[in-house]
Image (cartoon, rainbow, N blue to C red):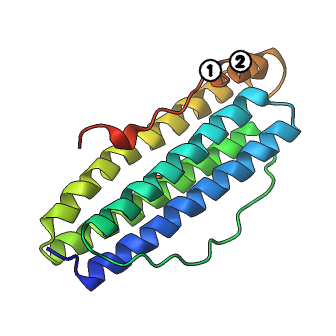
Amino acid sequence: MKINKKVEDVLNKQVNAELWSAYLYLSMSAWCERQGLKGFANWMRVQFQEETSHALKIYDYILNRSGEINLQPIAAVERSWKNVLELFEATYNHECAVSEMITSCYETALAEKDHATAGMLQWFIDEQTEEESNALEIIDQIKLVGDKGDGIFFIDKELASRTFVDSTKKAE
Ligand code: FEO
């Protein structure tokens, strides 16, 4: 069944929000590179890829439901942070904001009795829980070791090992 206009609109807005998230993490990655934190930069660059895959998951879904794609401008993002603690607090806050957007899309789908879209969005609801908890875990580590010296060097080494795995391809 062709997607209804209200649901199509909120999903198009969510494509924009996911691309905006990708943009934010790319900006964060660039900031980390400039600080000489290659591992942090890698983590953020993988996050950029994750967000791009999220945007494409919704994009493909709209097209599969015979909907129309409406790509709007992507808002500018921050370019600098005080330190890595502030960086990851911003990451956590951003993910919480995205979670609220996903919840709002889910509620629209239910209000329109579009259970197929609600089902697709359930994947995002689970993913958001994981993204919030990943950011919180790194905040805890930074608080434990401080944001300078050997401790941060150790976390940087850890974050260097993150690789992109396209989780949107897993079964829903
Ligand atoms: Fe796709 Fe991190 O929200």
Which quadrant would residue 86 be assigned to in this image? top right
Query: Residue 2: where, in percent of width, then height?
Result: 19, 77
Ligand 1 within 8 Å of the CB at mark 1 = no
The residue positioned 36% from the left and 80% from the top of the image is 9
The residue positioned 74% from the left and 60% from the top of the image is 78
Tell me if label 2 and label 1 are in contact, CB under 8 Å. yes
**Identity, as a three-letter code, of the amino acid under mark 2:** Lys
Query: Quick check: 53 above or below 39?
Result: below
Q: For this view, does 118 lie left or right of residue 124?
A: left
The residue positioned 60% from the left and 34% from the top of the image is 139
| Residue mark closest to the camera, 2 vs 1 | 1
Ligand 1 within 8 Å of the CB at mark 2 = no
Dot 2 corresponds to which residue?
157
Identify the element where label 2 is drawn.
helix
Dot 1 corresponds to which residue?
161
What count of labels does the image hold?
2
Query: Residue 131: where, in percent of width, then height?
Result: 46, 42
Which quadrant would residue 170 be assigned to in this image? top left
Label of residue 13 in the image = none
Q: For this view, does 159 lie left or right of residue 70?
A: right
Which quadrant would residue 117 be assigned to in this image? bottom left
Q: Judge the density around disc 1: few (<14), some (14-19), many (≥20) Cα neighbours within 10 Å.
A: few
Front one among 111 and 19:
19
Identify the element where label 1 is drawn.
loop
Query: Residue 23: where, in percent of width, then height?
Result: 65, 57
Query: Quick check: 70 above or below 123?
Result: below
In the rendered view of the protein, which quadrant contains the N terminus? Answer: bottom left
Q: Spatial distance from mark 2 to mark 1, Cα to Cα?
A: 7 Å
Front one among 68 and 24:
68
Query: Quick check: 71 above or below 165?
Result: below
Q: For this view, does 172 lie left or right of residue 13?
A: left
**Identity, as a three-letter code, of the amino acid under mark 1:** Ser
